[in-house]
Each structure stands twice: as structure tokens, then as C-alpha cells.
Image (tube, grey):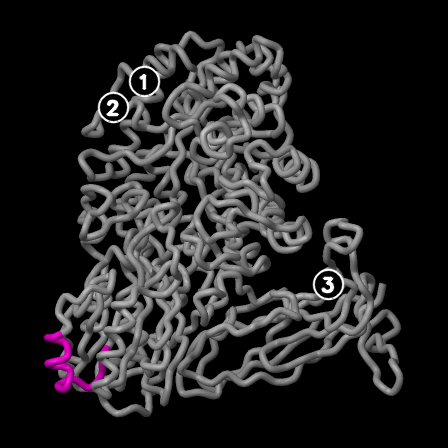
Amino acid sequence: MYGELEESEYDRPGEIDDDIKIMVRLMTIREKIGQMTQLNQDLILTKDGELNTTAVEYYAKNYHVGSYLNQLSSNGVNYNHTAYASILNNIQQISLSVSNDTFKIPIIYGLDHIHGAHYIANSTLFPQGINMAATFNPQLVYEAASITAMETRAAGVHWTFAPVLDIPMNKQWPRVFENFGEDPYLSSVLGKAAIHGYQGKYKTDRSKVAACMKHFIAYGDPWSGQDRDSTVISDRTIYDYLVPNFQTAIDSGVATAMEAYIDINGEPVVASSKYLQQLLRDEMKFKGMLVTDWAEIQHLYTTHKVASSHKEAVRLAIHSTSIDMSMVPSDTTFFDSLVALVEEGLISEQRIDESAERLLQLKKDLGLLDVDNEGWKVESTLLQQVVDSEQKNGRQQTSIDAARQSITLLKNNDNILPFNNNNNNGNNNNGNSSNSQPIKSILVIGPSANDLSHPSGAWTIQWQGATVDRWHGSVEDDQFYSQGVTILEGIRQSASPDIQVRYIEGFDIDGNNTSMDEVLDVIKDYDVVVAAIGEHVYTEVPGNIHDTRLPAGQIKSIEMIAESGKPIVTILVEGRPRILESIVDHSSAILQAYLPGPWGGQAIGEILFGLVNPSGRLPYTYPKHAGDLMLNYWHPVNDVWDPLYEFGHGLSYSKFAYGNISIVNKTDNGDNGIISQGDVKYPILSATQPRTITIPVTNQGPFDGYETVMMYIQQPYRRLTPPAKLLKGFHKVFLESGSTHIVKFDVTADMFAYTGIDNIPHGTIDPGLVHVLVHDRKLELQLLD
């Protein structure tokens, strides 16, 4: 169990309060539509980032704007918590003072805080979502979200557009790194942890914010791999693999949701009654507030080409769906069009009231309607003191721990890792070390070794992150990275003083030769080469690629180094699995770092030298071939399956041995619920006979460490081709060397439910033989109706 509350204690959206209904009934149409309008901050800021009070007055008086979004910065430097809160308080006070509205209603401000409160200077940055998934540790996800909520609220911001719950089925997609991996169950568990961390008791706890599950739905499966391209997918796949984590988020009380940019089988989600009314509201029972993604209603006209004008786009979206707020974001076309549509009788006032009620209920729940006591700012000063206090070191430690537990050891030939090191200070897992020869000299190369932007990725400081080449504009990163640790620095910190560590870049992130001659000239003088390679910083459309292989120059450079005969340890700093080609064979060891944040270098250094035992597991399937973009471990059992590394793969410096699976619960008759099939007897599994199983796990290695114990289910035969297997449980346990832990899982019949021939979601359970798999152990059960 993670978190501080029992499940029933977490707040969640519910029915609309009577006072909110009365408010909406008394408001004008324009006031209500204003609440549905969200504008970008650049409409009310000057070019140098100062607040344009005249613009704030204009939009408040004429458009009753209910929300603004996006980062606040001045000449590339983001504001800190105090400055943020001051600007937002000014927006609130101006809006309320000039408004002639029936009620004084503050705006709600939203930020894409994807891996920490990264739009606000001096906040805690965490590893990206894919790293958090690789930890398989919901407690760390909960803690990171709790810290992010507090640091967000300290800036006067009440709403974060997170967590990201897409299932990245296509590995070429440039938003793989923002999510919790390809598995529906893993994403469900971690999404729930994040939501509880962000929200908690958000209706009374003013250190919490509203979370936003996104992007609903099927965004992570573009047919081409390009961001925002069409998705071609069956309803069965949507229900069985894409709905579960969003359903868990709803059941966990997520306050808001964001729809997806895409069209599904030609139907834009933003105008889809099927997905945003029937599925989200009627079937999944979501009662919270629904916002569009960036300009998505306008895209019905400009991009999707299903509306012949902006006005028609607004009519389609509002009439067909349950959208409550339009992220317009750069003009007032939504407001003007929707007012006209209501006046013309094409959109009913009742439809507008439904959205206005949900919006005002959200604001009430967050304390924003407490205007007399300035409920939008009463918490900011106290929280700012916490942000600036000594507790900052503890928050930073959570980020470091998440990086440590996410780094995934993919390959370790001849136990080259950990490097034999005299700098253990008693922390090397009971003083044990590797059996490898002592390392006296290390040559560090690669563009990601001495760069803090690459491990941090996008959504850092600004949308596309911060990079040395500043390809997207001038961005000042000192405000965030002054205390970060590069991979090079992490290696030097963890190495003993007698180990020589030298850095030569060799090649840049695009694979261009910058100093390979120097590398090849000195390589003979070093015992091992550590190469930090990977991807440029990106997200969304700017991150689109047409070839999933790493840049040819990176691959060629590793080949040239391999010709020296020196062992190579490759560190992958990448947001999605890039095809490695010959790098796999040329590397003695491979560490998948993903995007571990500005403190990732410390974690990597500690792992290389055995100060930390690696425990990360792949949260996605790593393809071997450039054409295998859609490899997911839960593929239909008859599909060709040739990955480089499978979901869940990850090595340790210890050996963990698994005992036999045992069934611990008996039937009401005291027996073990056995059924005979010929000469073979199987334990029964049914709706009335769930099972609890246990399995002992022993650390037989010399290192203390974490082990993630995963339980899969498998059905060899059923009416529709079954998936190869499905994750249905996991526990991450810490085992000292020589110790044993008994891990327990519940197994239920509904774990085998799927969407059958009749297309009833999760409505089919086929009786027959089923398997429960834990590591290399298998338990056979007889599943009954």
C-alpha cells in the first residue's frame, strides 16, 4: 500500500452541488461560455513576459474567460514560485475587479507538469514517465506526484495536465517517454498512484491540485508512428488494452480528463459521441471535467477536414460530445462561435449548463470560489516557504531514488559491471564487489555524457526542453540545472580517486564526427570505454522520425571504437527504443537510462561502480528490427515475435532464485478445489473460487537489491486468438543477500475476461486450462464458467 490515505478517503468528483446548479441557472449564456474558454498565456503577456493588464481586463470584461494555461517566463527565464503566484494573483484580481458578471469567479490556471513542476524555476525535476514505469514502484510515483502537486500549488496553479496514460503501442511515436509503458496493468497501477499523489483530499487539502488523465483515447497508436496521425484500431483492442488504465483513473477519482488529438478509424475524437459521450461518460462513468487538447476543436476545420468552418467545428464538438472546456488557445473563435450557435438555437442552453456546472464544481472543490477570503491564494505563501526550506533536499532525494530504481541493465557480458572500485565507503551492498578485474582508467565518450538536457528531455523549462544548441529558441537552463549531475560527473563522483576518467565527445547527437580522431588515438591508454549515446531532446510533432535506427554516425562510431578491442559499456539516453543494430554486439554491457532527469548521472555512476544494484525493468518491448514498430509483449500468440529485449527484462548484480508456486486458500469444504481432467488433476478457478498464490524469492547473489516479481496469466486456447500473456500483478521487494521473501498474489477469474465475438466489453470468459506464470514457474488451473 502506498500513500497516506485509505482508498475510500481520496476525494473524487461527484454529483453537482445544489449551490453550483443555482449559480449556473442565474448566469448569462456569455458568462457560462466564458467559463468554457481557455486561452494561452501569450495573449495576456508582453513579449518580455510581463503581465499585460489591459489584455487581462479586455478578456475578462468581454469574454468572461474561465481559464489560462502555459508557462510564465521572461526572456527565456521561467518565474519562480513566488513570482508565478504574484502574476496569477494579479490576473485574478484584475479579472474580478473589472468583471460585471453575475458572480465573481476566478480563473483556473493549468500547466503541463509532466515530470515535476518543471515550468516553475527552482522546482524538483523527476525522471520522465517511462523511467517511473521502469521502477515498477508505485510508492515512488505517488511521492513524485505529491511533491509536484505541492510545488505547483505554491505557484498559485491549481491544475496539472498529468498523468499521461496513453499506451505507446507504436514505438516510433515521439511521446513514448511521457507514459507508463505498454502494459495496461502497469499503467493502471502507476496512474492510480500518480492521481492519488496529485489530488489526495483536494477538496480540503490546499497543497493538492486537480489531475488530468490524458489523452483519451488511442493516441499512442498512430498507424504511421508520426505524432497526431490517424489511428486504425478495433474496438476490441481499445476495450481490452486501452480502456483499463483510464477506467482505473476514473475509479481512483481523477478530477479532469483531456481528449486526444487524433482521429480513430477516420472519426476525430474531439467530435466523437462514441468516445466522449457513450464510452467516457455513459460506460466508464466519468463525472469530472473534460478539456480538449491544443486547438483541437479548430482542427476539425483546419486539420481533420470534417467541418467547413470554425463555427461548424464548434457545433460538431459541443453538440456531439461532453467536452466542457476548449483549449482554444490563441483567439476567441470558440467563444464567438458558441454564443452564436446558442442564439441560433443550434446548441441548447441545457448543453452549456452541463459543462458550466462541471467547471464551477471543479473550481469550488479546489477552493477557487472562496472569493471573499481570496481562496485562490491563501495557500501560496506557506507553500512557498516549504519549497524554499531544507525539505528541498528530501524532495531531490526522491528524484535520485527514482532514477536509481529506473536504470535498466539490458546486457552484462562476463559481469563486466559493476566496475571493481575501491571507493565503496561501506555502501557496496555489504562490502561485496564484482569479480571483474580492477578498472584503472575510463574513457567516456558520446554527446549525452556531459549534457544535462539530454537526460532530462522535453517538458523541461519549456515545451521542447533545454538544449545546448537551442534549436527552438533561447532558453536559460541554469535556474534548473545548477545542482544536477551529468553522466560524466556521476562517473567521477563514484569512481575511486586512483581511477583516471577522461572525456572526449567523439561525435554529436546527430552522429557527426567532432573528435573521433582524438578518441581513436588515445583509446589504447584506457581499460574501458563508456559511451553515452541516444536522442536529441524532443516531444510531439518536432520529435517525429522516419527511421527508428539511431543516427548512422553514432552506430559507425561505436563500430570504430570496437575495432580497438577495448570493452564498451553503452548507456542509452533515449525517450523511445531506437534500433541499435551492431551496437548490441559491440557492447559488453548496455544500460538503458531512458530520460532519468537532471540527477540521472548520479544514479548511473553509482550503478556502474556497484554502489547501487540495478533494478529497473523494461516497461516496453525493445525491438530488434527497424520495421517492428508495433511489437508489444501482449501480441496475439500466433504473431511473429522477435524482439531484442522483452517487456520486463532487466538484469541485476545478484541472482534471484524462485521457488514453486503454492495455492494457499482452501475451498469451503476444506479441500483445494480440485477437478480431474483424465488422469490429471487441476485446481479450480472460478468467479466463486478465486485463488491466492505464494512464491518464495531468494537473493542468492552477493549484492543486496530490489527484485520485481511479476505475475502473468496465459490462456493456451480460447474462442478468439489469445495474447501471448498478460501482466496481472507485480511486487517490488528488497532482499538482502541470502534472504528470502514470500510474495503473494491474488488470481481471479475476471483476469481472463476479454471482449468476445459478441463485442461486449470484457464480457467473455472461456472455460478451460489457464496458466499463472511467475518468472520461470508455471501453475496450471482449470477455469470454470
228 vs 686, nearest the viewer: 228
Magenta-tinted stretch:
517-529
Q: For this rendering, which residue is in front, 383 or 446?
A: 446
Q: Are marks 1 and 2 in contact (CB under 8 Å)?
A: yes
Q: In the image, what residue type sits under mark 2?
A: Leu
Query: Of callouts 3 and 2, which one flags the residue occurring earlier in the amino acid sequence?
Result: 2
Q: Amino acid at mark 1?
A: Val
Residue 568 x, y percent position in the rendering: 27, 80
Number of other residues with Cα within 10 Å of mark 2, as a class: few under 14, some 14 to 19, many 20 or more: many
Instruction: Examine the rendering and report whether any part of residue 733 can be seen.
Output: no
Tell me which residue sits at (56%, 27%) in the image: 317
Q: Secondary structure at mark 3?
A: helix
Numbered-mark total: 3
Report the residue at 22% width, 79% height from top.
560
Q: Is residue 158 left or right of residue 478?
A: right
Residue 752's label in the rendered image is: 3
Q: CA distance from mark 1 to mark 2?
A: 8 Å
Of 395 and 716, the residue lying toward us: 716
Q: Mark 1 or 2 closer to N-term?
A: 2
* Distance from Cα at disc 1 to Cα at disc 3: 55 Å
Label 1 crowd bin: few (<14), some (14–19), many (20+), radius 10 Å:
many
Magenta stretch: dominant secondary structure = helix
Q: Secondary structure at mark 2?
A: loop
The x, y position of residue 696, in whole percent, is: 60, 81
Residue under circle 1?
56
Q: Earlier in the sequence, mark 1 or mark 3?
A: 1
